[in-house]
Image (cartoon, helix red, strand yellow):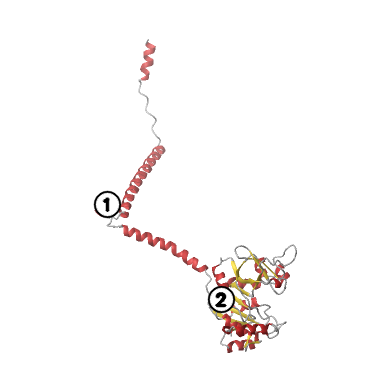
């Protein structure tokens, strides 16, 4: 019994107090308590601040006497004004950036050279009493989308004819190999900054100004990766196989897939399908100005050399060409025999004279 009593008594014997914390442990404990206290005070301050914010939103005023802060009054109108100003400030840079991407200023260039192999002196051939280059200039001048129009030539006789008609001329180097490079040089030598350059063929005395406008608008409205726009018109089936008629095919979005002097598209029979619509490429090119700086420096590409068509270099280098469809019945002057047909059209339509 005595053993059991001793055993029970030991259960109620006070335990020895735990060992005292070391100085380092005490410091850690104090830091933890301070962190907890700081967190609690921060939470209370946040709740208090949120309540004051809600009062401001609801049109109430802060009570400076009750809060002990400096006298600050915030009304619902103040908050709305602040939010509106912040939204406008955030929106403004985006609109400015978007504005920078737009192509607006347009220069029209009519390249013309006297020394033509097939038709020497063609720009100055007389058509119903006026030099052909002058008629082309006067027609193009009617386009509303052109901010400026110049004739680019290396010949003083052509220059004099345009100046006499009241037009503007830019003299270019004689050794320039093609119209595109002549346009690029003319743009460099023309005063002013332009976003778009339109290459207007000088042998199109009946060019419709509306077509020039449509081609320009197509490039203005196209995405930046599109650097070129050009028109096509329905081609007569009897002319599909003519090498002098450049054909064009496009995708469903109106971007050029290919240009060719041969029948395009071809078929298994190799014959013209009279139920199919073929499209003739017109000699009017509209370039992004920055792209035009690069284009003459690009080396010739395989398809370009095979077809002898500059626009294929654009496609082969991965750029997009926007194609628009128009109705253009008149044709250019390729040979001396074409002059008579152009004069007949002018005689039937006095507005062209």
Name the image quarter holding residue 120.
bottom right
Query: Which residue is depicted at the point 40% across and 40% down?
Result: 28
| Residue at the image point whose x is 43% and y is 61% from the top | 90
In this rendered view, identify the residue nearer to me: 195 or 149. Answer: 149
Q: Quadrant of residue 252?
A: bottom right
Indicate the quadrant containing the C terminus: top left, top right, bottom left or bottom right. Answer: bottom right
- Which comes sooner in the sequence, label 1 or label 2? 1
Query: What separation in Å lies between label 1 and label 2 (alpha carbons)?
Result: 72 Å
Q: Which mark is residue 210?
A: 2
Horizontal side of residue 176 vs 26, given as left or right:
right
Dot label at residue 51 = none
Residue 126, position in %: x, y?
65, 88
**Is residue 148 at least partly visible in the picture?**
yes
Query: Residue at 38% of width from left, 61% of height from top?
Result: 84
Question: In the picture provided, is 106 more to the left or to the right than 201?
Answer: left
On the image, which quarter does residue 220 sit in?
A: bottom right
Q: Residue furthest right?
A: 269
Q: Secondary structure at mark 2?
A: helix
The quarter of the picture where the N terminus appears is: top left
Mark 1–mark 2 contact, CB under 8 Å? no
The residue lying toward the viewer, choosing from 140 and 279, is 279
Kind of element beneath mark 1: helix
Q: Say which mark, if any, is on residue 67.
A: 1
Q: Which tag is nearer the camera, tag 1 or tag 2?
A: 2
Q: Position of residue 294 (x, y in %)?
A: 62, 71
């Amino acid at each position: 019994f005595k053993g059991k009593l001793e055993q029970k008594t030991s259960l109620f014997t006070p335990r020895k107090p735990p060992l005292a914390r070391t100085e380092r442990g005490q410091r850690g404990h104090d830091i933890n308590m301070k962190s907890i206290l700081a967190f609690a005070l921060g939470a209370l301050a946040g709740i208090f601040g949120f309540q004051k914010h809600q009062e401001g939103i609801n049109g109430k005023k802060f009570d400076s006497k009750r809060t002990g802060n400096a006298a600050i009054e915030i009304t619902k109108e103040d908050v709305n004004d602040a939010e509106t100003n912040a939204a406008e400030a955030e929106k403004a840079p985006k609109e400015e950036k978007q504005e920078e991407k737009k192509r607006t200023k347009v220069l029209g260039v009519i390249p013309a050279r006297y020394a033509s192999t097939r038709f020497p002196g063609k720009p100055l051939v007389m058509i119903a009493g006026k030099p052909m280059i002058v008629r082309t200039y006067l027609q193009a001048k009617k386009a509303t989308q052109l901010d400026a129009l110049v004739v680019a030539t290396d010949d003083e006789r052509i220059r004099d004819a345009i100046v006499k008609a009241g037009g503007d001329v830019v003299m270019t180097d004689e050794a320039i190999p093609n119209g595109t490079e002549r346009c690029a040089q003319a743009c460099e030598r023309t005063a002013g900054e332009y976003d778009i350059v339109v290459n207007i063929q000088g042998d199109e005395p009946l060019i419709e100004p509306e077509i020039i406008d449509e081609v320009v608008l197509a490039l203005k409205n196209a995405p930046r990766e599109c650097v070129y726009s050009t028109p096509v018109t329905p081609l007569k089936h009897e002319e599909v196989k003519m090498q002098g008629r450049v054909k064009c095919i496009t995708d469903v979005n109106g971007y050029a897939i290919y240009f060719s002097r041969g029948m395009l598209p071809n078929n298994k029979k190799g014959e013209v399908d009279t139920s199919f619509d073929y499209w003739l490429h017109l000699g009017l090119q509209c370039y992004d100005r920055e792209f035009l700086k690069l284009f003459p420096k690009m080396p010739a590409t395989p398809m370009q050399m095979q077809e002898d068509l500059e626009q294929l270099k654009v496609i082969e280098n991965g750029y997009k060409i926007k194609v628009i469809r128009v109705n253009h019945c008149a044709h250019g002057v390729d040979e001396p025999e074409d002059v008579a047909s152009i004069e007949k059209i002018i005689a039937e339509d006095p507005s062209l004279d």
